[in-house]
Amino acid sequence: MKFSVKIVTAVALLAFAFGAIVMAACSGGGDGDDAQAAADQAALDAVKDQATKAQILAAETVFRVEGMHDLDDTISEATEVDPNWQGKVTRMRRATASVVWPEEMKDHAATLVTKLQTLETALQDENLDGAKAAAPEAHDAWHELDNIAYPYIAGEQAESHDATPSGDANSSGEQNSPSATEMAH
């Protein structure tokens, strides 16, 4: 199986963050110093935050590698079910379900998992009509999560977006890339 550099990088970041959490949790001085305990807790919280961000980035990368946008388009135009689609959807569902989502994203992530399960079931059953109905719903649910995930990763406030964002995973990146004005500030 061939892995993209993005997936390998995301997994490596996740592994590093997990190792840092374990090391931080095990490095308590045990001397009862409240200031040190507070500093240790702050450091642990920061590492946990970075681990969460790495998990989210890894899941988002799976959607881009698997091509959620193209998959939705392809299914909508198909005349029969391609057996490769199910594996793509299964990987996206599992990646989403594996993340320990922050509170503000849990409902969006749960909705996405449900929509992906519906699509996955339709594909397993070779139900093209069901897949054609489920694919755009899963795609929209991903965009709803995607629109808050990247600002979270960057430590920014998420902007309000409608159900059909202007950019997409396979577009030139307008949706998730900062504008020239934003980069100048």
Image (cartoon, rainbow, N blue to C red):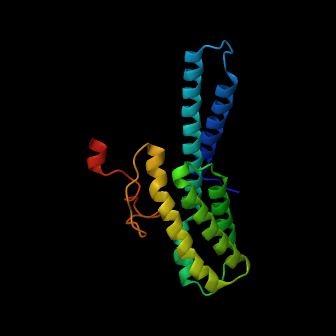
Q: Quadrant of the C terminus?
A: top left
Q: Quadrant of residue 86?
A: bottom right
- State whether residue 28 is above or below residue 55: above
- State whether residue 160 is above or below residue 6: below
Rendered location of residue 64, percent (x, y): 54, 60
Rendered location of residue 17, percent (x, y): 61, 36
Name which residue lies at 65% across and 39% down.
15
- State whether residue 64 is above or below residue 132: above
User: In the drawing, does residue 75 fall left or right of residue 127?
Assistant: left
Q: Count the labels in the image.
A: 0
Rendered location of residue 12, percent (x, y): 63, 41
Name which residue lies at 60% across and 50% down.
7
Q: Quadrant of residue 129?
A: bottom right
Name which residue lies at 56% across and 50% down.
56
Name which residue lies at 65% across and 74% down.
118
- State whether residue 24 is above or below residue 177: above
